[in-house]
Image: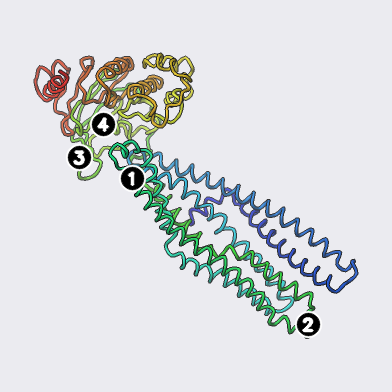
Amino acid sequence: MTRLLRLIIPVWPAMLVSILLTVFTIASNIGLMGVSAFLIAMAALHPPIAAISTAIVGVRFFGIARAVSRYCERCLSHDTTFRLLSRLRVLFYQAIEPLVPARSGLYRSGDLLSRMANDVDSLQFFYLRVVAPPAAAVIILVGMVYWLSQYSEQFALILLGGFMAAGLILPLLVKYAAGSAAAEAARAKGQLTALVVDSVQGAAELIAFGRADAQVEKVRVASEQLNRVQRQSAYAAALADSLSGFIGHLSAWLVLLPAVPMVWNGVISGVDLAVLVLVIESSFEAVQPLAMLLLHAADSRQAADRLFSVTDTPPAVSEGGAPIAPAGYSIEFNNVSFAYNEQDSVLSNLSFKVQAGRRLAIVGESGAGKSSIVGLLLRFWDYQSGSIELDGRPLKVYQPAGLRELFSVVAQTAYLFNASIKDNILLAKPNATQQELDQAIQAASLTTFVENLPDKINTIVGENGRSLSGGQRQRIAIARALLKGAPVLVLDEPTSGLDPVTEREVMADIKKVMAGRTTILITHRLVGLESMDEILVLNKGTAAEHGTQADLLARQGLFYKMWKQQKDMLE
């Protein structure tokens, strides 16, 4: 809770004004009820109009003041709260970025979405219904106790007891009635959101394997679980509303017990009695929101815990390092060992070197550790032992963000956003000129394809490029790499999943990208490797052999066996 309160610091003046407006609104309502009671009671006595003219003006004043102050308070409090929630969402996203991809596997994408949307939204109750109401209630209580004590200390004590019951005892009762609904609701929302996201993303597979009905049943069960805990919260809220109103009415009745004899004895007038009853009952508007205070606090605590459990996760790599610009772009691995966890080693004492401007192909069977090399180069992970050097300096001396600017990556599954082709390519260089963009599109052999589209380069590709073929998606990824113009090119299985004809066409485009750059091509498809300066063969995370394609074929080792096996399959 302390961390949530610290977020208020930048906007505390607005929060303070909001609380004061709340107090003024409640005070105006109390004044309206009191003056109205006075006016009606006095009017029954048929006094001269002059005797009630002030009360008539008071009714108008307090009525208008209540409406205006309520409007201003709602506008200010909600605007301040929504700005705080917006800041929270940005902070949450900024915290997620360093966790990708090393730590993002700890969470389902739907669960992260639920935390950013549902949990952040839940925190609006913390600022609107946990922070502000107690402050307003205390101010109103102090004012009311002082005013009532002018009549009788008994009246003040009755009101104080009613406020204590409604503001302290009732919240405990409501929290007990709600049980663990707050914690269960947050988890249930996360599970339901994750299931729905999985169902939408995997709809084709679910239908193809006849599991759509089973998935619908999972969603139904998750929805019923959420409904159950929400019903429990609704019952607690209903209890809070009814008992809060009952305490207010009871307090007004209890005041009548000593007040009526005081009227008989001439201590106070009958008009005062009417005013007392309505003022006391209307003052409970200040304490009524406190009935749900602990429930909202529990909701907020659960939401905050889910958010901070992500933001407090340490990144896999440190963000240290200096903004060093390398003079050259040679890459060297020296006895590098790496494991995603302590049990499973991925790379073991791996050593190789790529001179600046040279082209290295890294081949091997699936699971040999090829793609892990990409993650280490981009510092998504850090290795456990050995060293990786760029231009003779360890990678860890470079700032991760600056280091990644030196690499253009064509991944096996390059992600395309649900945006236009232009926006997806400009991801690599947002400030690129139209000429640079056209050159990248032409070099990636996308010109004819783009020109035949109805909206040309502004055509929306769908989520992850679902409206495109595999070859078209890879060409867009190549266009990105070309547009970025980074000195080091990393190609991770760029032709995976493509048919042989498309594969040859894409590899021809890739060769254009390689020109003049330090290039690492990672693949298990031994196509087009004759143009590589050197080939490194990985086997279970270690370097089995290396050399040119001609040298490796002549040795008839592991590379030769892989090459012959693929050649026989194609024939």
Side of 88 where 278 appears, left or right: right
Q: Are marks 2 and 4 in contact (CB under 8 Å)?
A: no
Q: Position of residue 557 (x, y in %)?
A: 9, 23
Could you classify mark 4 by the number of other residues whose Cα lies within 10 Å: few (under 14), some (14-19), or many (20 or more)? some
Secondary structure of the residue carrying tag 4 is helix
What numbered label is drawn on residue 213?
Answer: 1
Q: Which quadrant of the structure image shows residue 228?
A: bottom left
Secondary structure of the residue carrying tag 2 is loop
Disc 2 marks a residue whose amino acid type is: Val
- Which color scheme is applied? rainbow
- Compute the Cα span from label 2 to label 4: 90 Å
User: Mark 2 or 3 closer to N-term?
Assistant: 2
Observer-side mark, 1 or 2, equals 1
Could you classify mark 1 by the number of other residues whose Cα lies within 10 Å: few (under 14), some (14-19), or many (20 or more)? few
Observer-side mark, 2 or 4, equals 2
What numbered label is drawn on residue 345?
Answer: 3
Disc 4 marks a residue whose amino acid type is: Ser
Q: Position of residue 174 (x, y in %)?
A: 50, 67
Observer-side mark, 1 or 4, equals 1
User: Mark 1 or 4 closer to N-term?
Assistant: 1
Side of 499 where 542 appears, left or right: left
Residue at the spot of label 4:
371
Q: Position of residue 481 (x, y in %)?
A: 37, 22
Could you classify mark 2 by the number of other residues whose Cα lies within 10 Å: few (under 14), some (14-19), or many (20 or more)? few
- Compute the Cα span from label 1 to label 2: 76 Å
User: Mark 1 or 2 closer to N-term?
Assistant: 1
Give 267 or 359, whichever is nearer the viewer: 267
Residue at the spot of label 2:
267
What numbered label is drawn on residue 319?
Answer: none
- Compute the Cα span from label 1 to label 4: 36 Å
Give 543 or 156, whichever is nearer the viewer: 156
Could you classify mark 3 by the number of other residues whose Cα lies within 10 Å: few (under 14), some (14-19), or many (20 or more)? some
